């Protein structure tokens, strides 16, 4: 008979850790039935070097020895720590960083997740909310109606290194070293889209569950965080929504056989047998209208920065035709300025001399009325769409225009206003246009003594 295998200490720890992991997940299934799809989306993966949970959007990493020690000494800590990492994925924190400082972005994300957890009325997740947490939530609530990662990050940029270190120590729960180094990489974005769908499922389950989804205030905060992380797209990719197929002068090297072409040159001198096509079809933007909300609440520097960023994208040859028409309207409750740019070279001149005009209320209708007039006059013969850059609510047209319309809202920490069913909506981070300076932080180390973890 073959000898019976005797488990090593490491194998025993791995086996028991998987059982603990399953038990923790089971407790969360019972406490949060509307999050079942998200809770089971992360596969348990052993990583002995860790001293906390970590995730990359595909797996939840942990050290078996660490998990067993915490389970024996502070069992209630584990469900909250597990859910903390899952909520990072549901809120899509791993894929929304952009060019921000990764350490400061991690602190902002931890504060957002812990704020939601501290307000969930679930016994298994409760922990003491100390003075520093209460003060942090109150201070941020005065400046951000919704504590989502973007607005919190901007507020953290105004603090000094000592304050940030205290916040890092207070809100730390999981390791962020496995987060994508390049959030815009195709593989990372695919994972992000998967979690965007899981976020939709979670939101739908909460709406169907009604009162089961904890108390109303906490449920609303959780839904708002999910909504804040949904639908974020690269600006360049978003502009492709307005693109059309059209021929442009350019050699199409795919439309002839190079062998026959070379044979003609060798045999007959300068007479190729097949000449390449001088035009090819490209999917690019032809005519576009950009409407700038210049109401009293709009920042002139932010509008100018948005305009420069937009023009920089439009000037790329892969996005826009060289010969085009770009109409820029400044509008608050009336059209205050109208500029028609007929080529890409005029964009830089307009951006450098741009002056904000307006300061009244917000009404979207005058801009659409003027656009319709210009279409009837033939000025905009091939209009593909309208980008309406705004920071708040306004009065929408009663009927759907015969072209695509996208409202671009700034993430101010408040819920994004609803738009008509016929319009697209995109949330933009102000950091994409005016980047705040992040302070330098000292290296952060985990406490050596496990008793320093919060006792739940």
Image (cartoon, helix red, strand yellow):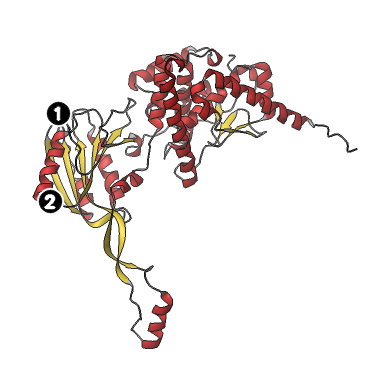
- Work out whether residue 157 can be spotted: no
Give the foreground label among 2 and 1: 2
For the residue labelled by badge 2, is the local secondary structure a helix, a strand or a loop? loop
Residue 360 - label = 1
Q: Residues within 10 Å of mark 2 (few under 14, many from 20)?
A: some
Image position, residue 420 (x, y; %): 25, 32
Horizontally, residue 401 falls left or right of residue 197, namely left
For the residue labelled by badge 1, is the local secondary structure a helix, a strand or a loop? loop
Location of residue 431 by image quarter: top left
How far apart marks 2 and 1 lie (CA) works out to 28 Å
Residue positioned most to the bottom: 268
Residue at the image point whose x is 18% and y is 35% from the top: 399
Residue 379 - label = 2
Image position, residue 329 (x, y; %): 16, 41
Q: Is residue 13 above or below residue 1?
A: above
- Work out whether residue 283 can be spotted: yes
Residue at the image point whose x is 12% and y is 51% from the top: 379
Q: Residues within 10 Å of mark 1 (few under 14, many from 20)?
A: some
Image position, residue 322 (x, y; %): 24, 58
Image position, residue 191 (x, y; %): 49, 40
Task: Work out whether mark 2 precedes mark 1 in sequence or the reverse, and give the earlier one.
Answer: 1
Horizontally, residue 276 falls left or right of residue 136, namely left
Quadrant containing the C terminus is top right
Number of marks in the image? 2
Quadrant containing the N terminus is top right
Which of 163 and 381 lies nearest the eye of the viewer? 381
Query: Do callouts 2 and 1 mark residues in contact (Cβ within 8 Å)?
Result: no
Horizontally, residue 22 falls left or right of residue 428, namely right
Horizontally, residue 148 falls left or right of residue 349, namely right
């Amino acid at each position: 008979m073959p000898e019976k295998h005797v488990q090593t200490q490491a194998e025993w720890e791995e086996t028991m850790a998987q059982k603990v992991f399953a038990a923790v997940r089971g407790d969360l299934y019972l406490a949060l039935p509307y999050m079942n799809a998200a809770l089971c989306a992360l596969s348990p993966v052993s990583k002995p070097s860790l001293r906390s949970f970590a995730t990359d959007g595909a797996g939840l990493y942990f050290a078996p020895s660490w998990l067993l020690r915490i389970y024996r000494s502070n069992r209630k800590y584990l469900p909250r720590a597990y859910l903390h990492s899952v909520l990072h994925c549901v809120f899509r924190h791993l894929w929304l960083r952009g060019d921000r400082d990764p350490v400061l972005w991690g602190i902002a994300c931890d504060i957002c997740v812990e704020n939601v957890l501290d307000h969930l009325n679930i016994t298994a997740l409760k922990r003491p909310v100390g003075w520093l947490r209460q003060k942090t939530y109150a201070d941020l609530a005065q400046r951000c109606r919704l504590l989502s990662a973007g607005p919190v990050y901007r507020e953290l940029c105004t603090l000094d290194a000592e304050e940030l270190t205290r916040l890092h120590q207070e809100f730390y729960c999981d390791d962020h070293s496995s987060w994508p180094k390049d959030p815009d990489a195709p593989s990372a974005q695919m994972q992000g889209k998967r979690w965007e769908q899981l976020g939709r499922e979670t939101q739908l389950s909460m709406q169907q569950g009604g009162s089961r989804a904890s108390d109303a205030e906490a449920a609303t905060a959780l839904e708002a965080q999910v909504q804040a992380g949904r639908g974020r797209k690269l600006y360049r990719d978003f502009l492709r929504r307005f693109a059309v197929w059209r021929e442009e002068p350019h050699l199409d090297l795919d439309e002839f056989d190079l062998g026959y072409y070379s044979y003609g040159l060798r045999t007959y001198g300068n007479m190729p047998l097949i000449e390449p096509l001088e035009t090819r079809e490209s999917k690019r933007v032809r005519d576009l209208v950009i409407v700038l909300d210049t109401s009293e609440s709009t920042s002139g520097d932010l509008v100018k920065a948005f305009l420069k960023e937009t023009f920089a994208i439009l000037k790329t040859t892969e996005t826009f035709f060289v010969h085009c028409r770009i109409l820029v309207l400044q509008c608050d409750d009336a059209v205050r300025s109208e500029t028609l740019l007929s080529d890409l070279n005029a964009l830089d001149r307009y951006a450098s001399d741009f002056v904000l005009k307006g300061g009244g209320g917000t009404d979207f209708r005058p801009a659409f009325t003027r656009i319709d007039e210009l279409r009837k006059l033939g000025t905009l013969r091939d209009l593909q769409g309208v980008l309406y850059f705004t920071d708040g609510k306004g009065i929408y047209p009663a009927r759907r225009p015969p072209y695509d319309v996208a409202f671009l809202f700034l993430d101010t920490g408040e819920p994004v206003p609803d738009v008509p069913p016929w319009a697209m909506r995109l949330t933009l981070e102000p950091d994409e246009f005016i980047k705040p300076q992040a302070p330098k932080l000292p290296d952060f180390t985990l406490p050596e003594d496990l008793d320093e973890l919060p006792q739940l």
